[in-house]
Image (cartoon, helix red, strand yellow):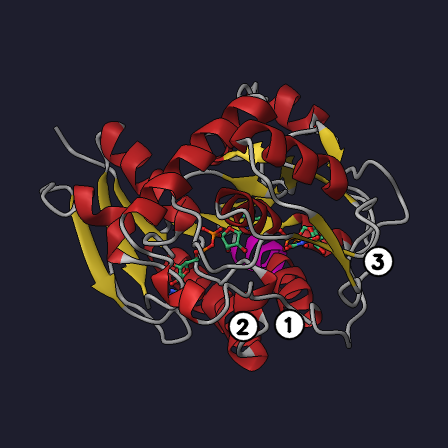
């Protein structure tokens, strides 16, 4: 049997590790390329014994020459804390990384899928967001390195498709959560769960009335898989996310209830350019991929809480406790 050779950039990260797993289950031969900035061997330890999984430490800002049939381009830090750590490198990862991977796809004839983001909509003036909305992004703010980098990558994908006939797919991913999230990524789900489990104050930035829509990781990976395997005419962009919208305050209250925590809610200043609302219209994904999320928020949170409980038992957070248990946060 001839296995499809699939390259996953960012394969040791949160989403990438589940995608590698799914591809091996689908009898693909997987090459995971990662510079380990936010990724970790812990995420892929269980795959290292498979003859159909290979890990290559490599930075996508440097050209790569390998022979593959498909490329999933996930390499890029995704949380505000991580992508704002070295903003210039974040832009390079999105832009130079996209060019390098598109060149590879052009040379090999591989299909290539870009993991774009709901951040391309910025702080949206249209709600909920459809794919034809062009967005409201501040090109100068602290989130711009990520938002504009991802927007430019979408442009590059479109131009390689038009100009060179590269077979592209663009997924716009909305907030996704689940086990294997980086415990220090400062994202709302991981922060709130860790704070609740340790009975520390729950840090709400701003009023807590801002909204997000949270998709469980298994649903999201299923969407990426379906998109890659869709007809060549389906290029995207396609929103992938859970259309169940909740406020940050409601999320905090749910997590406190599920964990039975004694944590209080504390209100801190809002982050700059923080989008006030975010919710995907997923009609296109339903029609073109026959996809919609299946895992309800409550179930996804319960499973994610169990994962963070394990990390605490393993002693992951002693260091955080030594530093007063402070939580990282973006600008
Ligand atoms: P993550 O930070 O866990 O994974 C990103 C991976 O890319 C990490 O393993 C990291 O080490 C690697 N990486 C970063 N820069 C690299 C470089 N220059 N060269 C090689 N590898 C590099 O994040 P994630 O949540 O798994 O996100 C994966 C992709 O999905 C990202 O492109 C992100 O923008 C996109 N996305 C994620 C979400 C979400 O909610 N998780 C939402 C929208 C879009
Ligand atoms: N947020 C918060 N407290 C935290 C972390 C995040 O109130 O400890 C808020 C944040 O300001 C934003 C929302 O939760 O409004 C989602 O933040 P996250 O960083 O998870 O994702 P993104 O802003 O990229 O959607």
Q: Which residues are magenta?
A: 157-164
Residue located 11% across and 41% down the image:
50
Dot 1 corresponds to which residue? 145
Q: Is residue 227 magenta?
A: no
Residue located 56% across and 81% down the image:
88
* Camera-side residue of 87 and 288: 87
* Residue 320 coordinates in the image, percent (x, y): 43, 65
C-beta proximity under 8 Å, tags 2 and 1: yes
Using residue 256 as the reference point, say whether residue 7 is left or right of it. left
Residues packed near mark 3 inside 10 Å, few (<14), some (14 to 19) or many (20 plus): some
Residue located 44% across and 29% down the image:
303
Residue 326: which quarter of the image? Answer: bottom right
Per the model, the C-alpha gap separating discs 3 and 2 is 20 Å
Instruction: Name the disc covering residue 136, or none.
Output: 3
Is residue 43 shown above or below 34?
above
Dot 2 corresponds to which residue? 90
* Residue 254 coordinates in the image, percent (x, y): 65, 31
């Amino acid at each position: 049997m001839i296995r499809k050779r699939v390259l996953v950039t960012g394969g040791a990260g949160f989403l990438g590790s589940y995608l590698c797993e799914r591809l091996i289950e689908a009898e693909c031969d997987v090459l995971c390329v990662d510079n380990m900035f936010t990724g970790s061997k812990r995420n892929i330890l269980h795959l290292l014994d498979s003859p159909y999984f290979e890990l290559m430490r490599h930075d996508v800002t440097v050209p790569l020459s390998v022979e593959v049939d498909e490329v999933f381009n996930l390499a890029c830090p995704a949380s505000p804390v991580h992508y704002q750590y070295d903003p210039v490198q974040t832009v390079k990862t999105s832009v130079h990384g996209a060019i390098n991977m598109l060149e590879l796809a052009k040379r090999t004839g591989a299909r290539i899928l870009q993991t774009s983001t709901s951040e391309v909509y910025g702080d949206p003036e249209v709600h909920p967001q459809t794919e034809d909305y062009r967005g409201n992004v501040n090109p100068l703010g602290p989130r711009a390195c990520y938002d504009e980098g991802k927007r430019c990558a979408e442009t590059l994908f479109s131009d390689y498709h038009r100009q060179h006939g590269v077979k592209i797919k663009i997924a716009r991913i909305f907030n996704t959560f689940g086990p294997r999230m980086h415990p220090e990524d400062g994202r709302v789900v991981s922060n709130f769960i860790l704070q609740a489990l340790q009975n520390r104050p729950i840090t709400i930035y701003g009023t807590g009335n801002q909204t997000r829509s949270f998709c469980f990781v298994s649903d999201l990976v299923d969407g990426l898989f379906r998109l890659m395997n869709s007809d060549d005419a389906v290029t995207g962009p396609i929103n992938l996310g859970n259309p169940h919208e909740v406020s940050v305050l409601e999320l905090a209250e749910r997590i406190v209830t599920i964990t039975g925590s004694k944590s209080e809610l504390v209100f801190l200043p809002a982050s700059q350019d923080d989008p006030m609302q975010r919710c995907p219209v997923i009609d296109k994904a339903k029609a073109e991929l026959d996809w919609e999320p299946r895992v309800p928020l409550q179930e996804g949170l319960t499973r994610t809480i169990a994962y963070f409980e394990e990390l605490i038992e393993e002693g992951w957070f002693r260091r955080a406790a030594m530093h007063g248990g402070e939580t990282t946060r973006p600008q």
